[in-house]
Amino acid sequence: MNTKSEKLRDACELAAQTFSKLNPADYREIISKLQFCIGSFNFDKNPSGLFEYGYEALNMLKDIKKKNPRKVNKNIITSLEESLSS
């Protein structure tokens, strides 16, 4: 059974993978922050970093989707939005 925090972790993992597929060099900072927060959450189960960088990733993905609708899957944005609103 997934908790809300675990769903957020999974959504952040998808976001990090999406940034990696787009252009890892351009998104190196957000990728490393997300990966760090995911690892930290897996260790201590404190989701505060996931929320902080989850919001940042969500805003970045929305901006990318506005400019290039086909580059970002809507499900990733929806997954982040649902996880962050819980």
Image (tube, grey):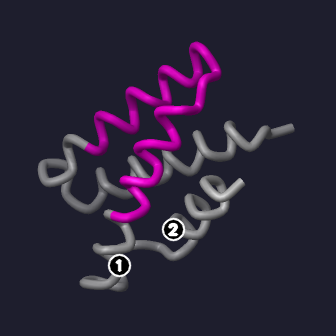
Residue at x 50% of width, y 46% of height: 12
Which is more N-terminal, label 1 or label 2?
1
Query: Is residue 57 toward the left or the right of residue 46 in the image?
Result: left
**In the rendered structure, does residue 58 fall within the stretch colored magenta?**
yes
Quadrant for the C terminus in the image: bottom right
Q: Quadrant of residue 85?
A: bottom right
**Which kind of residue does numbered mark 2 sit on?**
Ile
Instruction: Give the image location of residue 45, x and y in percent.
Output: 64, 21
The main secondary structure of the magenta stretch is: helix
Quadrant for the N terminus in the image: top right
**In the rendered structure, does residue 55 fall within the stretch colored magenta?**
yes
- Residue situated in front as seen by the camera: 30 or 46: 46
Residue at x 25% of width, y 84% of height: 67
Question: Of all residues shown, which one is farthest toward the right?
Answer: 1
Residue at x 56% of width, y 59% of height: 80
Query: Is residue 36 toward the left or the right of residue 9 in the image?
Result: left
- Give the Cα separation between the discs numbered 2 and 1: 9 Å
**Which kind of residue does numbered mark 1 sit on?**
Lys
Q: Quadrant of residue 53?
A: top left
Residue beneath disc 1: 65
Instruction: Give the image location of residue 37, x and y in percent.
Output: 44, 30
Residue 49, numbered label: none
Please tell me whether residue 60 is drawn above or below residue 70 in the rendered image: above
Query: Which type of secondary structure does the marked residue at label 1 adopt?
Result: helix
Please tell me whether residue 24 is drawn above or below residue 61 in the rendered image: above
Q: Which residues are magenta?
A: 30-59
Residue beneath disc 2: 77
Please tell me whether residue 66 is drawn above or below residue 38 in the rendered image: below
